Amino acid sequence: MFRKVLVANRGEIAVRIIRGLREMGIRSVAVYSDADRAALHVRQADEAAYLGASPSSESYLRIDKILAAAAEHGAEAIHPGYGFLSENAEFAEACGQAGIKFIGPTPAAIRALGSKTAARELAEKAGVPLAPGTKKALESAEEAQTLAAEIGYPVLLKAAAGGGGKGMRRVDRHEDLPAALRDAASEAERSFKSSEVYLEKLVLNPRHIEIQVLGDEHGHLIHLGERECSIQRRHQKVIEECPSPLVSVTPGLREAMGAAAVKAAQAAGYTNAGTVEFLVDPSGAFYFLEMNTRLQVEHPVTELVTGLDLVHWQLRIAAGEPLTLRQEDITWRGWSIECRVYAEDPEAGFLPSPGRMIEHARPAGPGIRLDSGVYSGWTVPMEYDPLLAKLAVWAETRELAANRMARALREYTISGITTNIAFFLDLLEDPEFRAGNLNTGFLDGFFARRPAVVPDAEAKVVAAIAAALSQPRVATAVTSERASRWKSQAGEGLYR
């Protein structure tokens, strides 16, 4: 086993990995930028290395600086977390060339699955269901129109090199396709430095369900079941749960999706932890979407239901240990729900709300897990993704888990900035959520059903006091220009 591991990330995921390292008796090395000098992950690590200025392009995305820090501190391996360089094949390759173990899949597997078109081609060869569409980048608007006419509208244009909704356009009419293709290609070039766009049939009202896989370096690969990730805003997940409400009442669906995920991973020669994502239509048919070659943000719900520690297994696999688990050993007990707590204002279109946190009172009690990267007095920086923490709960049933989450959210206090905690409380009371009637357009219906929020006199006084106490701080309702700045500076730190 490794004696020292560098964590090439920040925030809550860096803290979570550092805790896993300490539990296994492994020393940790944190890295940090100017904005993160006093960050929690730096405080918790055994050692820390300065990378550079706050923008991720000058710090967390600098392969040379990260490798230099690993060499200086004697780290034998690097855990990339998620976001930033976690799915960068060049980084994984550079680690190997430097004699440092990359805790993740091989560079070849990352490349094979990094291009959405290449991944679709690989999945098809492995016999994994695909939505009708192209497996090569489109070469012209005429080609796109011909293919769209064959598979039928509506269709979806998607960036071959990216995700998170960038370079994506829905097209309902033949005459709108050329302009949409130009726009999608332009956005893809800006976001991913690749203008390649492909086309697929739009699956209407789908659920987004993903399968966690785990494979060792000796050819053994299994799945750990599904996560329901259908509640999203701007193609970014907001709340996740395990198991899926659909899968739990559909006999054989977990086995079929799990087998398909394992096939896709095996076709890529995959090792370590990864996630195969699917769209599931209202009839229950599922289609391969992509594979994320890293640890997912929402991994805690799988851990809570299976009883397995994915970070521990990542380290053991990277150290060459065989996977001692067989598929029949994996069991799923109870129900887990996770809320992603962001510094953002749902009432203002989920605009980011950076600033200084005055209070950070954590929920506690049975079945509560909080993966957090912040503390009271911490200033949430503009430079990175505004994820503050992940609040996850476990209970025997979905109803009890939802009730427990509501209780935990009421105990969770963050003052000085605006967060989405109150939004989650409203969402948990929604009858459609309680019934498990989910799809990727869920939030549109939720906001349509939800009555307008009119603060009462007491709430206005509380808000005024909170605003006074938090001065000086960044205004909670930032302009769209500043929101755009946040997104552009966060770069690859945005987590799907």
Image (cartoon, rainbow, N blue to C red):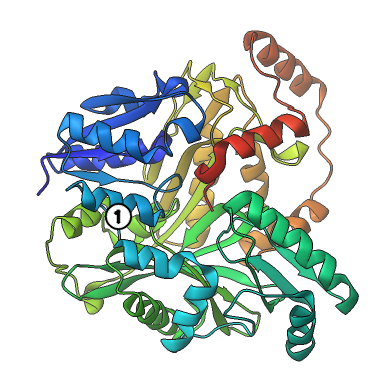
> Residue 141, image x and y in percent?
78, 75
Count how many numbered circles sit on residues in the image: 1
Query: In the picture shown, does residue 447 fall above or below 375?
Result: below
Decide which of 452, 153 is in the foreground and name it: 153
Please state which of residues 121 and 195 is positioned toward the viewer in this rendering: 195
Q: Residue at x 62, y 24 (%)?
A: 417
Task: Please provide percent x and percent y for residue 43.
Answer: 31, 22
Q: Is residue 38 left or right of residue 120?
A: left
Q: Classify residue 183 as left or right of residue 363.
A: right
Badge 1: how crowded within 10 Å, few (<14), some, or many (20+)? some
Q: Secondary structure at mark 1?
A: helix
Q: Nearer the viewer, residue 299 or 120?
A: 120
- The answer to whether residue 372 is seen in the rendering is no
Kind of residue at disc 1 = Glu
In the rendered image, which residue does mark 1 sit on? 93
* Residue 149, percent from left and from top: 80, 87
Any part of residue 436 in sight: yes
Name the image quarter holding residue 199.
bottom right
Above or below 495: residue 472 = above
Image spot of residue 6 (x, y percent): 25, 38
Q: Which of the two residues, 91 or 226, is positioned nearer the viewer here?
A: 91
**Residue projecting furthest to the right:** 175
